[in-house]
Amino acid sequence: MGPDKSLAWILPPDLARLRVLEQWVLLLLEAIRARIAEAEADQRIAAAARPGAVEAPVVQWAIQYGIGRDRRAILVHTGDCRLTSGRTRPATLEQVRDALRQPGVDPCDICGAGRELGLTDP
């Protein structure tokens, strides 16, 4: 994607000054990202300090169930897998291991649940 022609008037024509501007913009971007991280941390701290604030439990494992009458377990995911659906429920490590002993239940290849459980090579 090339530079926007409407902004060409603001940029210097020579390479040396363009490189200086490039470095300045990168430093500015780094400073902005640091400030965003600080603001997010402040927001989390403020939310935790509110009376009655309860942090959502961290889900480490999830089991995805199939469609149909029996709705059997079909996949095991890590808690942060992006492939989970509305048919996925939080599970304990023990429930996950029990599910994987059932025929037709596999660890998710996307999130690497098998690697996390030590079932496949890294």
Image: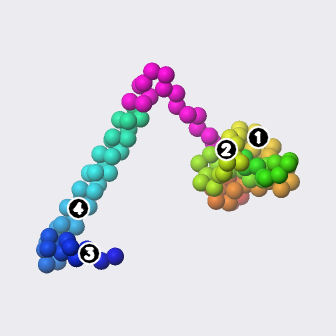
Whether residues under marks 2 and 1 lie with C-beta atoms below 8 angstroms apart, the answer is yes
Left or right placement of residue 103 versus residue 51 in this view:
right
Q: Which residues are magenta?
A: 46-61
The amino acid at mark 3 is Pro
Residue 44 seen from this side: yes
Secondary structure beneath dot 3 equals loop
Residue under pointer 2: 61
Residue under pointer 1: 95
Residue 86 image point, x, y percent: 67, 48
Residue under pointer 3: 3
Earlier sequence position, callout 4 versus callout 3: 3
Residue 42: numbered disc: none
Quadrant housing residue 96:
top right
Whether residues under marks 3 and 1 lie with C-beta atoms below 8 angstroms apart, the answer is no
Left or right placement of residue 122 versus residue 63 in this view:
left
- Disc 4 packing (10 Å; few <14; some 14–19; many ≥20): few
Please name whichever residue, 69 or 89, is drawn nearer the observer in this view of the structure. Answer: 69
- How far apart are labels 2 and 4 at the CA level? 41 Å
- Disc 2 packing (10 Å; few <14; some 14–19; many ≥20): many
In the image, is residue 87 above or below residue 17?
above
At x 38% / y 30%, what residue is drawn? 46
- Our reading of the magenta stretch's main secondary structure is loop
Residue under pointer 4: 25
